[in-house]
Image: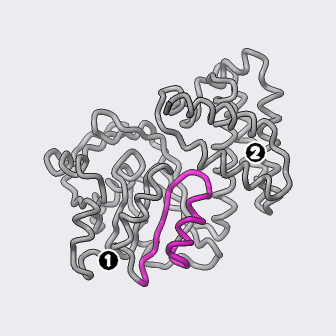
Amino acid sequence: MRILIAGAGATGGAFGTRLVEAGRDVTFLVREARAQRIRAAGLRFIAPEEDRTNRVPVLTAAELAGLGVEERVFDLVIVAVKANALESIIEDIRPAIGATTLILPFLNGMAHIDRLEAEFPGQVLGGLVKIVATMRDDAVVQMTDMAVMTIGRLSGGEVPADVRTALEVPGFRLQVLDSIVDALWEKWVFIAAAGVVTCLFRAPVGAIMAAGGRARVLEIIAELEAVAAAADHAVSDKAHAMTVSMLTAEGSSFTSSLYRDVTAGAPSEAEHILGHLATTAAGLGVATPLLDLTLVQLRAGEIVRTA
């Protein structure tokens, strides 16, 4: 398969590197400045006991649009960008989408699924990844050995065999689920709970526990899991236990990516993750006072940040 990966950051760069090294036909779609750096120096990938640089094909949106139909249309388009880039990336990938192209997004939350389905009906797969990775000095850095990619048909049914074959490579574990929407909801609820907990109390988990916040954290988890249950995607006992364990661990330095973006004064995915969940809850008739309180705080902070 011809695979286009939109984004060569922490997620796209890490999984893309593994695909490239397994001999898959992969091209990265990136911004002009990133394209220039990768063409000049390659794509550096650092993982536990690994550090190497690969020469990889890259395209900018303008270059992709300028190709002939046979060159620009890909079999699989992986979207690995942050939510605030979704609208621009939809236009960027449009020339790459043919009648049989499948789109596999790895964004947090669920709003992007509806948006992509509206643009490319019937061509979107459900997907999520588990990886601890970041960008450091233009290198992709995977900080632990954990790397799992989970995919599935949104409406159930079989994932095409050629997609499964293309994505089964050394370096990460591929999971194919019939119930991918349930898995997407579980991840959404966890990320939202982590965001509410750390942003509302403005601290890592360990400090929140030391301040006597355990009962409030459990309230937040219950509040958000009630939304999933009302949407007929109840969180499993295993996922609930994992969420409670991570968000009530004594002495933990854990913070959410949303918290890290907000405290760094950077654009965040607050609306994509928390805002969409609040809207969904309201539509289902589920009260979410702690989520709503957090959103007021974050929105007020964003007004100040952009003033």
Q: Is residue 86 above or below residue 160?
A: above
Please give left or right for residue 157 compared with residue 4 in the image.
Answer: right
Residue at 41% of width from left, 58% of height from top? 88
Please give left or right for residue 269 compared with residue 284 in the image.
Answer: left
Are discs 1 and 2 less than 8 Å apart at CB?
A: no
Q: Amino acid at mark 1?
A: Val
Total count of labels = 2
| Residue 9 locus on image (x, y percent) | 36, 47
Question: Per the image, is 41 magenta?
Answer: no
Q: Which residues are magenta?
A: 99-123
* Residue named by callout 1: 73
Task: Count residues near mark 2 (Cα–Cα under 10 Å), then give few for <14, some for 14-19, many for 20+.
Answer: some
Q: Which image quadrant is residue 183 in?
A: bottom right
Q: Nearer the viewer, residue 236 or 138?
A: 138
Q: Amino acid at mark 2?
A: His
* Residue named by callout 2: 240
| Residue 37 locus on image (x, y percent) | 19, 45
Foreground mark, 1 or 2, reads 1
Q: Nearer the viewer, residue 28 or 238?
A: 28
